[in-house]
């Protein structure tokens, strides 16, 4: 039998749920609901005007952060998609100041947490030890107004839903570094300033023309060929970024290739799945079942028809037998 408990309190203070309800001390985890797919939905009752971090533990002495959230309402909801794979699970919530707060999912590393926040389509941001890492930012400055400017920007290729030179200029911190394939560096819209701060990584047919990996800002970034009929070899760089010992894969636009299937020890994968541009749901499922990341985020999943059902279908197709956690987030 799987056991679920709750501990709740302000920073460093743990209280049993019953004691908390008597004291009426915010924040409160008021509901722990087991869903039909074995995931656990948490309902957090808390006043507006603060941030909140939900932590989880399997043994009580050791806790890991799950998510940092804020909200305009006093009732916040979070679904723990890792719960089906754990025998015991306890939760607690902590109140945080909104000052300099970055919201998102947490990934524990050997040197602090990475906080991951979806922005839209192919774009997300990661915060780690004061560094901001942007992936394929587009849409100008407004989508990133709540984040500090980027210390590092990863650009997969030069298609307009992944790359805009004006957006790079708008979100890049002074002296911020861009990592990109040659097709981005050489794009007519790239300014001299952007080019002078860009590191070219090569993959596929360009792997012998440019370095395939680089170490920057205490991170290691490796380019991997991501190809299909719409993206020839060397055009699209998928990346494996090592952050505090954790390997984070981002696909850009690609098919279900042997290079991707052969990747090992991936902790988190961001995988595209939209037709006719990248993978079908079946292809994405086969790719993940071969790669076997610990966590996968379906992203870049809006089809040419405008439908956005691929992510949910992928989660159902993948199943739970391999113990791979699928996180569905708001990309559209």
Image: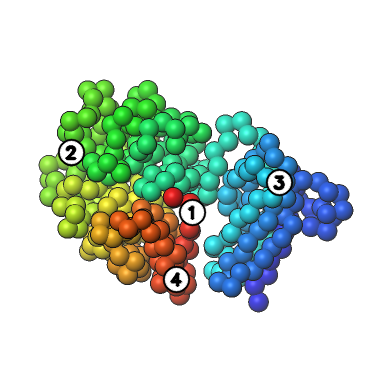
Q: Tell me if I can see residue 266 in this picture.
A: no
Q: Quadrant of residue 229?
A: bottom left
Q: Residue at x 51, y 33 (%)?
A: 146
Q: Quadrant of residue 52?
A: top right
Q: Quadrant of residue 254?
A: bottom left
Q: Earlier in the sequence, mark 2 or mark 3?
A: 3
Q: Tell me if I can see residue 39 in this picture.
A: yes
User: x, y percentage for residue 145?
Assistant: 48, 32
Q: Residue furthest front?
A: 305
Q: Are marks 4 and 1 in contact (CB under 8 Å)?
A: no
Write down the residue under mark 4.
316
On screen, residue 53 versus residue 303, left or right, reads right
Q: Residue furthest bottom?
A: 1
User: x, y percentage for residue 57?
Assistant: 63, 58
Write down the residue under mark 3.
74
Write down the residue under mark 2.
182
At label 2, counting other C-alpha atoms closer than 10 Å, the crowd grade (few under 14, some 14-19, many 20 or more) is many
Looking at the image, residue 176 lies above or below residue 225: above
> Gap in Å between the C-alphas at discs 4 and 3?
32 Å
On screen, residue 287 versus residue 141, left or right, reads left
Write down the residue under mark 1.
329
Label 2 secondary element: helix
Q: Residue at x 40, y 58 (%)?
A: 308
At label 4, counting other C-alpha atoms closer than 10 Å, the crowd grade (few under 14, some 14-19, many 20 or more) is few
Q: Are marks 4 and 2 in contact (CB under 8 Å)?
A: no
Q: Earlier in the sequence, mark 1 or mark 3?
A: 3
User: x, y percentage for residue 9?
Assistant: 75, 48
How many circles with numbers are drawn on the protein? Answer: 4
Looking at the image, residue 207 lies above or below residue 295: above
């Amino acid at each position: 039998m799987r056991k679920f408990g709750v501990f709740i309190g302000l920073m460093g203070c743990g209280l049993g749920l019953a004691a908390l309800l008597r004291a009426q001390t915010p924040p409160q985890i008021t509901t722990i609901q087991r869903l039909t797919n074995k995931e656990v939905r948490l309902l957090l009752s808390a006043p507006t005007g603060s941030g909140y971090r939900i932590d989880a533990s399997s043994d009580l002495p050791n806790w890991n952060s799950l998510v940092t959230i804020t909200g305009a309402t006093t009732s916040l909801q979070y679904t723990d998609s890792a719960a089906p794979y754990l025998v015991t699970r306890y939760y607690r919530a902590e109140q945080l100041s909104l000052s300099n707060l970055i919201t998102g999912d947490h990934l524990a590393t050997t040197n602090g947490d990475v906080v991951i926040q979806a922005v839209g389509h192919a774009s997300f941001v990661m915060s780690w030890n004061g560094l901001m890492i942007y992936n394929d930012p587009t849409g100008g400055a407004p989508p990133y107004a709540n984040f500090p400017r980027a210390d590092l920007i990863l650009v997969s290729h030069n298609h307009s839903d992944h790359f805009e030179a004006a957006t790079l200029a708008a979100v890049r911190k002074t002296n911020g570094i861009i990592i990109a394939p040659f097709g981005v560096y050489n794009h007519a819209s790239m300014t001299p300033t952007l080019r002078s701060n860009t590191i070219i990584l090569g993959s596929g047919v360009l792997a012998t023309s440019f370095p395939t990996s680089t170490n920057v800002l205490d991170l290691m970034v490796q380019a991997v060929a991501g190809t299909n009929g719409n993206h020839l070899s060397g055009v699209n760089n998928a990346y494996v970024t090592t952050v505090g010992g954790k390997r984070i894969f981002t696909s850009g636009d690609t098919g279900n290739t042997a290079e991707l299937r052969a990747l090992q020890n991936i902790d988190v994968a961001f995988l595209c799945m939209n037709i006719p541009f990248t993978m079908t749901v079946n292809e994405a499922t086969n790719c993940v079942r071969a790669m076997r990341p610990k966590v996968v985020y379906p992203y870049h999943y809006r089809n040419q028809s405008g439908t956005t059902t691929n992510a949910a279908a992928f989660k159902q197709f993948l199943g739970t037998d391999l113990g791979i956690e699928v996180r569905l987030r708001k990309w559209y």
